[in-house]
């Protein structure tokens, strides 16, 4: 894959589409195997797409979040796991920007652009199991984190840990994945997202240098410092909606080329059955609505991101409403489409060989990590009480 030379959004999108074409050739088989998509991750590295969001003054391409999200959705049409890895690469990469110091923002942007780092994480804010002990101005980590995203084969890890001597205060750091004592375990066994390397990471006397610890002294208390759940929600929304787009296209091709008409229908081709036509019409309408919703939410993210440290609580709250709603609606539509496409493809489509259920398994796995009922509740609370969702790890 040749790196994009020009700096036009359409060129980056074209590069992503070419990547997706390659990834689609063995996506179904790789889903069965699981493990690390090393070849595909390296293709993303070579594509130049890992630094498009980094500002130009730090060696990147200065593109907006909306383009990143569009690429996430393009990849998700064929491979939701790689789309997740790509989107979350940027979530980790920008953390020093919205929550760290100016010096950390400049350092990690510059080094990531120069070295073409692929970022992963090892962080579970709900179940803290990694303990840090202060060592001068740094820390020594021991324990494990039960959940990751793209830890294996990454270049940098965003890590959460707690300091028990400070009443379980949470710290965030950015360390080399090949740091001595970091052990990325091959224990991810989710029924979906099988190549996201989302298993556990063990830490044995891992040294975290002072400059690798997130410096919140300037950003603390500012709405912009709590931007991570906004990004997480809209990234996953695009993974989910892209999965629905991909499932619908696969179903369309199957119905045109392989589906047989029901023997009592008196139609020679399945595509002429009005009941199948009506169902496809419904699928397409709903998926287009979900696409429009995530794109509108992506524009809101662009606007909020441009505010940087001047972002207000109200502006953050407004962005959360759109990203959460896009995620909730997209999940609802995607679960419906990915589970019901078999009805218009026919019995022969439901085979292990075809592996069309991977689209549903990927969406279902994501939706359980952040239940849409709580998003609906938060939006309803705002609608009735005019109270924006309280900033948290998931809102």
Image: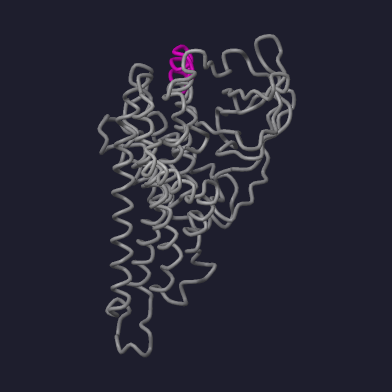
Q: Nearer the viewer, residue 265 or 296?
A: 296
- The prevailing secondary structure element of the residues shown in magenta is helix
Left or right of residue 164, residue 189 in this image: left
Q: Nearer the viewer, residue 86 or 160?
A: 160
Q: Quadrant of the N terminus?
A: top left
211 drawn magenta: no
Q: Position of residue 197 (x, y in %)?
A: 59, 43
Q: On screen, 250 above or below 374? A: below
* Range drawn in magenta: 100-112
Q: On screen, 51 above or below 32? A: above
Number of numbered discs on residues: 0
How did the renderer colour the structure?
Answer: one colour
Q: Nearer the viewer, residue 217 or 294?
A: 217
Q: Position of residue 392 (x, y in %)?
A: 51, 33
Q: Quadrant of residue 167?
A: top right
Which residue of the protein is positioned furthest toward the top in this rendering? 136
Residue located 38% across and 75% down the image:
258
Q: Position of residue 250 (x, y in %)?
A: 38, 63
Residue located 60% across and 34% down the image:
125
Residue located 28% across and 49% down the image:
292
Left or right of residue 58, residue 126 in this image: right
Q: On screen, 34 above or below 9? A: below
Which residue of the protein is positioned furthest toward the front in this rendering? 385
Q: Position of residue 225 (x, y in %)?
A: 46, 24
Q: Nearer the viewer, residue 373 or 50?
A: 373
């Amino acid at each position: 894959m040749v790196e994009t030379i020009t700096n036009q959004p359409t060129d980056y999108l074209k590069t992503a589409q070419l990547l997706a074409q390659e990834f689609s050739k063995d996506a179904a088989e790789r889903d069965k195997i699981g493990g690390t998509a090393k070849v595909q991750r390296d293709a993303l590295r070579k594509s130049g797409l890992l630094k498009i969001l980094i500002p130009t003054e730090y060696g990147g391409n200065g593109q907006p979040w909306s383009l990143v999200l569009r690429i996430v959705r393009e990849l998700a049409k064929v491979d939701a796991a790689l789309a997740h890895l790509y989107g979350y690469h940027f979530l980790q990469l920008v953390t020093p920007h919205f929550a760290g110091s100016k010096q950390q923002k400049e350092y990690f942007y510059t080094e990531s652009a120069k070295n073409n780092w692929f970022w992963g994480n090892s962080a579970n804010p709900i179940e803290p199991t990694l303990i840090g002990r202060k060592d001068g101005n740094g820390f020594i980590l021991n324990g494990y984190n039960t959940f990751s995203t793209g830890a294996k084969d990454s270049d940098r890890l965003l890590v959460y840990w707690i300091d028990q001597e400070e009443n379980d205060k949470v710290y965030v750091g950015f360390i080399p994945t090949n740091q001595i004592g970091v052990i990325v375990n091959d224990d991810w066994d989710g029924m979906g997202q099988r190549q996201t390397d989302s298993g556990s990471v063990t830490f044995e006397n891992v040294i975290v240098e002072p400059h690798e610890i997130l410096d919140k002294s300037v950003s603390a208390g500012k709405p912009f410092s709590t931007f991570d759940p906004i990004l997480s929600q809209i990234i996953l929304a695009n993974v989910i909606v892209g999965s629905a787009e991909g499932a619908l296209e696969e179903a369309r091709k199957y119905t045109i080329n392989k589906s047989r008409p029901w023997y009592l229908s008196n139609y020679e081709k399945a595509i002429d059955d009005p009941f199948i036509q009506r169902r496809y019409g419904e699928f397409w309408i709903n998926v287009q609505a979900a696409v429009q919703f995530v794109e509108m939410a992506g524009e809101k993210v662009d606007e909020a991101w441009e505010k940087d440290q001047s972002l207000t609580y109200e502006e953050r709250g407004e962005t959360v409403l759109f990203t959460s709603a896009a995620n909730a609606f997209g999940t609802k539509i995607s679960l419906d489409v990915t589970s019901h496409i078999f009805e218009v493809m026919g019995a022969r489509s439901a085979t292990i060989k075809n592996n069309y259920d991977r689209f549903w398994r990927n969406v279902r796995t994501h939706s359980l990590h952040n239940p849409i009922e709580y998003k609906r509740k938060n939006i309803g609370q705002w609608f009735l009480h005019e109270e924006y969702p309280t900033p948290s790890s998931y809102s």
